[in-house]
Image (cartoon, grey):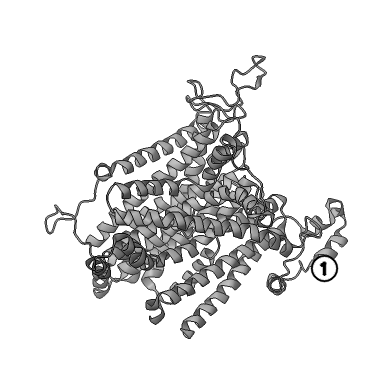
Amino acid sequence: MSETFDTPDVQRAESTATQAVIEPPAAEPASTTKPGEKPRRARPHEIFRDMPLLVKISAVWLILVVFGAIYAKLDQSVFGGALPLQDPNLQTNNFNSETGDFGTGEPLESPSTSHWLGTDALARDTFSRILHGGWVSLIVAGTAAGFGVIVGGLLGSLVGFVRGRTENVIMSLIDVILAFPALILLLALVSIFEVRSLALISIVIGVLSIPAYTRVSRAISLAISQREFVLAARAIGTKPRTILFREIIPNVLPTVLAYALVAAAFVVVVEGSLSFLGLSVQLPQSTWGNMINQARRDIRLNIAQVFWPSLALSLTVLALNQVGDFFQRRFAVRDSAL
Amino acid sequence: MARILGIRLLRLIATLFAVTFLSFIMTSLLPGDPAVAILGQDAIQNEALLEEVREDLGLNDPIPVRYWNWLTDAAQGDLGESYINAGQDVSQVIRDRVPVTAQLAIMAIILAVLMAIPLGVIGAYREGRWQDTTTSAAVQVALSVPNFIIGIFLIWLFAVQLGWLPASNWNRLSDGVWDNLRTSIMPATALAMTQMAIFSRLVRSDMIATLRENFILAARAKGLKDRYILMRHALRPSSLSLMTIIGINFGALLGGTVVIETLFAIPGLGFRLINAISQRDILVIQGITVFVAVVYVLVNTAVDLLYTVIDPRIRRS
């Protein structure tokens, strides 16, 4: 759980990016494109085919998590609970005033056909709570990636290209923010707000993600700005703005997007830690972190309820790391073959 | 060398100003009126009295003036008195709790390095073979499981199932090394795992590069044993980036201690910070944030300088 968010991954992404762009690869991948033919962009299923088995499994897991989260949210907001999924906040052992009876559920049930992953200490369905928790992780990670790629990516591409005083000023600012330990800065910021909604948490984490993205994209932009095609564009008198948007940014983007996956892994951990501390989105909204925190109190009775959300969180982080690493390697080769 | 030191020092001072200013501003934005916090809810009608207290605390001054006053006090070790817990001196709170957090962080780093070096060296020495694949897989897992989850499962195994160690609580070092170790080993291990993973990946990749160097070939040609070459020739040049990453990750570790201290109920800085946040104890939040940030900046600068001392190539450039 390292690091807005100056992750060692920032360092790694920075160095691999620069190396990849500057140093030609030892062996270029065999190319089937004929001279003069435009290199064809790889289709999604081709990328999937190229993945090692572990990365394939990771990608499938991520897709499942995303669909699960969207399904749970649709069920809650659009279909009003009509889809086949239990209410995440229903205490199944509660007294029901309509039937005049107590619910049939029990707290800390073992997995069964009615509760796939059992129930928690308040007899709520764990499977449903995990899907709903996935929604929080998805939104937080997605917003962070959005802020990072759009603001950080643009800023980094810009300063890496124009250099000079703009670069000095912006990078000094970035360095100050990165001079804070990430989680401490986040805690201090989050404590300012009394009501912590999903939107607020996402935006705070999103803004804090910008510096790391700026550093990564600056490093790539610096290397790309020295390439021959940029020199050529300058030589034929292309406007700097056009060079930035037509030459620099399209080449910075793939690597930054690959970095976004690795950064998302970090963001998911950070949100999990924040939830675990009770300082993220408020209850009863379930998050993986607050489920773990609630379940750990009954650790002497039942470890399974700690295990399921922990598994969901760890597998998601592992999967994001795997897929992110895969794309970082892939684009590193692509860049150097340009 | 003197020039480099000078530039570093200037940058350090600028960063310290910026970091303290940012922490100050952030915590000044915290909701809640300190005057009400001091006088209690009953005083809320008495606007004149509230105003007097605000004036007394200097809360009516413009932000730059307040920052300067606060900074000059802070530089002399005075971070003010908590508004919420009357009479609690913030500097004293920090002084009491630093040894605990520092011990945890240092133990975690030592544990992480001790585990990472053998793993990284094996991975590099056996690059691509099963020893490398297994250690890399283990490292990937360690990297992906957040520290609080590791902590909970350690508690479950060693405290609940086996009953060997206490599930929470803390014995200070002054209570005896053994008693202290019984309470510190689990939290330190939980903190160390992620660091271990990051360190060993780094050692592995640096080592692979080093092993391709000519001087390693020369050592092999002389007939030196592999183990000797790995430990005596290859490890030192491969551990330079390890040093930097330890410095960079120190901040992450300080963040990690917040979570781990809360999980194990350890009376360190992090646990106090969480308590302060739930009590809205502004000055304690401010004090701890500034303290941690300043320590982090200083550690990073120290590591940078150390790096320059160890590696002559950087010194000359």
Residue B206: x and y in percent read 34, 62
Residue B238: x and y in percent read 36, 65
Compare residues B202 and B235 and report the one nearer the observer: B235
Residue B64, image quadrant:
bottom right
Compare residues A34 and B222 and report the one nearer the observer: B222
Residue farthest along the bottom direction in this orientation = B2
- Observer able to see residue A249: no
Q: Secondary structure at mark 1?
A: helix
Residue A231, image quadrant:
bottom left
The residue wearing badge 1 is: B56
Residue B176: x and y in percent read 66, 54
- Whether B171 is drawn above or below A81: the answer is below
Please state which amino acid type lies under the numbered disc 1: Asp
- Say whether residue B275 is left or right of residue A240: right
* Residue ID at (51%, 37%): A309
Quadrant including the C terminus of chain B: bottom left
Residue B179: x and y in percent read 64, 50
* Residue ID at (70%, 55%): B31
* Residue ID at (84%, 60%): B50
Residue farthest along the left direction in this orientation = A34
- Say whether residue B24 is left or right of residue A259: right
Compare residues A10 and A233 and report the one nearer the observer: A10
